[in-house]
Amino acid sequence: MKNLLLIFVFTFSIFSIKAQEAIKDTTKVWTKKGNMSLLLSQSTYNKQWLGGGTSNVAGNFGLNYDFNYKKGGVVWDNKFILAYGLSKIKGAERTAKTDDRIELNSLWGKESGTKNWYYSMYFNFKSQMDTGLDRNNVKISHFFSPAYFQFGPGFLWKKDNNLSVNFAPAAGKLILVHKHFTEFGPSFGVLQGDNSRFEFGASISAYYKLVAVTNVSIENRLNLYSNYLEDPQNVDIDYQMNVVMKINKYLSANIALQTIYDDNSIKAVQVKEVFGLGINYLF
């Protein structure tokens, strides 16, 4: 099933490149742009290869889409992120998941009368699409479990579409997990026997995108959250960096880095990095 999904994603990417070349946004209040990529890697070794190594194949699909609104004194920035990756090592019993993410960020702002400052309202949703297994092949997560929601009013400082900071001093956070993951203990911060956890605190979200050199763009996103109701000094951190190194219109190298610290889930820093060379399409 997973192999079929990978083939479908590859086929979809090729046809999308050809079908969407002529698509352009003609509206005046909406700005839409996106990046779709398919990164593939493959290594093969025969029995006589003395250097060592195991044959493997891997693929990662990514979609990063922005649709932003601006009219008068109102701005509304939206970002949708979709990522999924698989890796198969020769001799392994199962295909391993290398990436799995669904994320939606929405930030609405109304001019306050002070330059670059807005009254704001933000919403953030994060989850995954596929089952997650630990090193012992035990299921620890699946679709919409866990699912994270953040929302709240605040103040937005926005210089332009490439640089902004939002501060929400009264922000809610909701974590949903299926009860079978909390049957024998806590999971993702949700207590044993429960299927949800609500927090109330403060959030700071920052976004910065720059062109480092020609054809190399770096996108940075940082989210900080402090829970007033429990250990407010333990700040949750979620930092994401996405680097796109464009080779030509359809080929690029991509680096995606994510670092998370959430002591309710695990008292350690979580780090994920994905690098690949493959098909890339800007629209």
Image (cartoon, grey):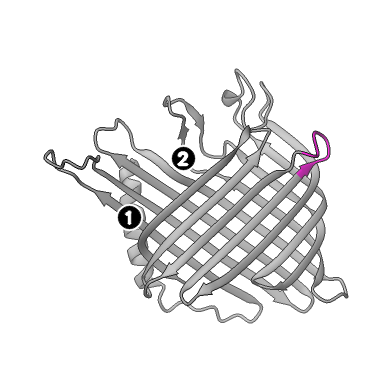
Q: What SS does tag 1 mark? A: strand
Determine whether, in the image, residue 274 is placed left or right of residue 219.
left
Circle on res. 130: 2
Q: CA distance from mark 2 to mark 1?
A: 19 Å
Farthest-out residue, front: 51
Residue visible at 63% across and 58% down in the picture: 221
Find residue 41 and report its horizontal and vertical position in percent. 31, 53
Magenta segment, which residues?
Answer: 226-233
Q: Nearer the viewer, mark 2 or mark 1?
A: 1
Q: Amino acid at mark 2?
A: Asp
Q: Quadrant of the N terminus?
A: top left
Determine whether, in the image, residue 274 is placed left or right of residue 79.
left
Most foreground residue, 58 or 268: 268
Q: Which residue does the numbered mark 1 point to in the structure image?
A: 40
Find residue 181 and report its horizontal and vertical position in percent. 57, 26
Would you place residue 183 above or below residue 3 in this image? above
